[in-house]
């Protein structure tokens, strides 16, 4: 039985792709990333379900604290 993995990340850095690739190896079809537009193509290329943060109302407040 696999447990869903939820990752929240904004920005398309190489280390995020590497971490997600490893996670998909051990938990295929059950990895989700909540992120921005820059992470969509990366997720599609490695088989991660992408959820655009702007479609989740609470993330508008959350993102105020993440911008740096």
Image (spheres, rainbow, N blue to C red):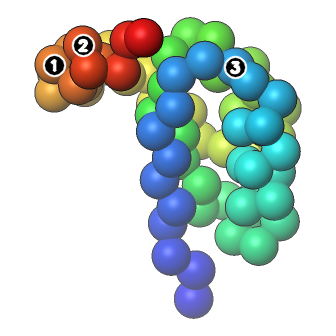
Which residue is under mark 1? 61
Q: Would you place residue 22 above or below residue 20 in this image?
A: below
- How many residues crowd around disc 2 within 10 Å: few (fewer than 14), some, or many (20 or more)? few
Viewer-proximal residue among 13 and 54: 13
- Of labels 2 and 3, earlier in sequence is 3
Question: Image quadrant of residue 52?
Answer: top left
In this view of the protein, can residue 40 be seen by the observer? no
Label 1 residue SS: helix
| Earlier-in-chain disc, 1 versus 3 | 3
Residue at the spot of label 3? 12
Q: What x and y, as percent, mark residue 28?
A: 73, 64
| Circle 3 crowding by C-alpha within 10 Å: few under 14, some 14–19, many from 20 | some
| Residue at 57% from the left image edge and 88% from the top image edge | 1
Q: Residue at x 42, y 11 (%)?
A: 68
Residue 32: percent from left, percent from top: 53, 47
Instruction: Indicate the secondary structure of the residue bearing disc 2.
Output: helix
Tell me which corner region of the image, top left, top right, bottom left or bottom right, holds residue 27: bottom right
Place of residue 18 in the rendered image (x, y in percent of width and height, measured from the top left): 83, 45
Report how far apart the C-alphas of labels 1 and 3 lie in the structure.
Answer: 21 Å
State the residue in front, 54 or 60: 60
Q: On screen, 37 above or below 62?
A: above
The residue labelled by disc 2 is: 64
Task: Tell me what residue is drawn at x 52 percent, y 61 percent.
Answer: 5
Cβ atoms under marks 1 and 2 closer than 8 Å: yes
Q: Nearer the viewer, mark 2 or mark 3?
A: 2
The reply to whether dot 2 and dot 3 touch (C-beta < 8 Å) is no
Most extreme residue toward the front is: 68
């Amino acid at each position: 039985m696999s447990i869903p993995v939820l990752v929240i990340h904004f920005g398309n850095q190489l280390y995020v792709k590497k971490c997600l690739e490893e996670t998909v190896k051990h938990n295929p079809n059950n990895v989700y990333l909540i992120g921005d537009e820059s992470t969509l193509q990366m997720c599609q290329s490695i088989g991660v379900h992408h959820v655009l943060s702007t479609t989740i109302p609470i993330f508008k407040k959350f993102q105020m604290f993440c911008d740096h």
